[in-house]
Image: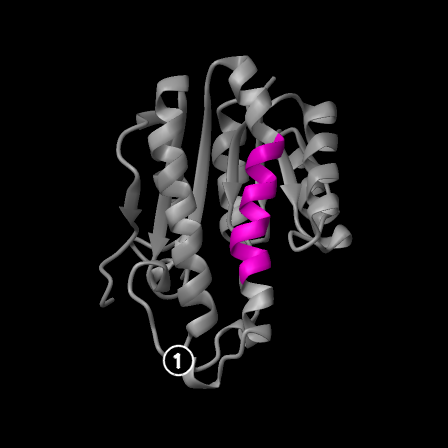
Amino acid sequence: MTTIAIVGAGPGLGAAVARRFGREGFGVALVARDRRRLEGLAAELGAAGVTAGAFPADVRDPASLTAALAAAAEALGTVEVLQYSPLPRRDFMRPVLETTAEDLTGPVELSVYGPVTAVRQVLPGMRALGRGTLLFVNGATAVVPEPERAGTSIAFAAEGAYAHLLHERLAPEGVHVAQLIIPGAIVAGHPRKDPAVLAEVLWELHRGREGFRCFADDLDS
């Protein structure tokens, strides 16, 4: 069995992606800070026939994230797919003229140091398999900076640049890298931004292995 590791797993998009990939036979590694919530989600998935495990970690703590992903591979199998999609904190989104260098520490730890740490942990396993997928999920500020949300605008843009560099370099090795931009909120029942719909988009990005950036909805929606 190979594994999808969902970094930033929660009851919305993370759970939907876990169910979608689980139906295809993937083990599911749920990675986030809240152990109790992860264990509850893993139990729900298990009841539905999906092999899943809870691997608590703080993505802003490289050692914690590295250990969680290593444990996931040991318990469930090599990580073939990594989805990096932790939600930013509200205080990351301050107006640009009120944003100090210190205010950018958290966003950069979340959206730059975190994904770099995660990729470096799982990439050797993907190379050994001869295949893999790295999926980055971001909000619209990754491509359209918002002056009232400076932290995510800066950090998401950096994350997108990193992902694009990986896309260019890893394609010849059979590792596909894609970024999904989700403008606005994820909304249950929305024709394009319902969690299950987005999970299907992410599955197709993994399966189709074409292109880099995909938009879940229009930017002005």
Which residue occupies 73% across, 55% down? 34
Left or right: residue 164 compared with residue 54: left
Q: Position of residue 122 (x, y in %)?
A: 59, 30
Residue 144 sits in quarter: bottom left
Q: Is residue 195 visible?
A: no
Q: Amino acid at mark 1?
A: Glu
- For residue 104, above or below residue 113: below
Provide the major secondary structure of the magenta segment. Answer: helix
Left or right: residue 173 compared with residue 62: left
Which residue occupies 37% across, 58% down? 189
- For residue 194, above or below residue 6: below
Q: Is residue 91 magenta?
A: no
Which residue occupies 74% across, 25% down? 75
Residue furthest toward the bottom?
Answer: 98
Left or right: residue 47 compared with residue 145: right
- For residue 170, above or below residue 214: above
Residue holding disc 1: 148
Counting every numbered tag in the picture gives 1
Give the residues drawn in magenta, as a range.
108-121
- For residue 38, above or below residue 218: above
- State the quadrant of the N terminus: top right
In depth, the one of 41 and 63 nearer the eye is 63
Q: Position of residue 199 (x, y in %)?
A: 42, 42
Residue 44 sits in quarter: top right
Q: Position of residue 80 (x, y in %)?
A: 53, 25
**Element carrying mark 1:** loop
Which residue occupies 42% across, 64% down? 154
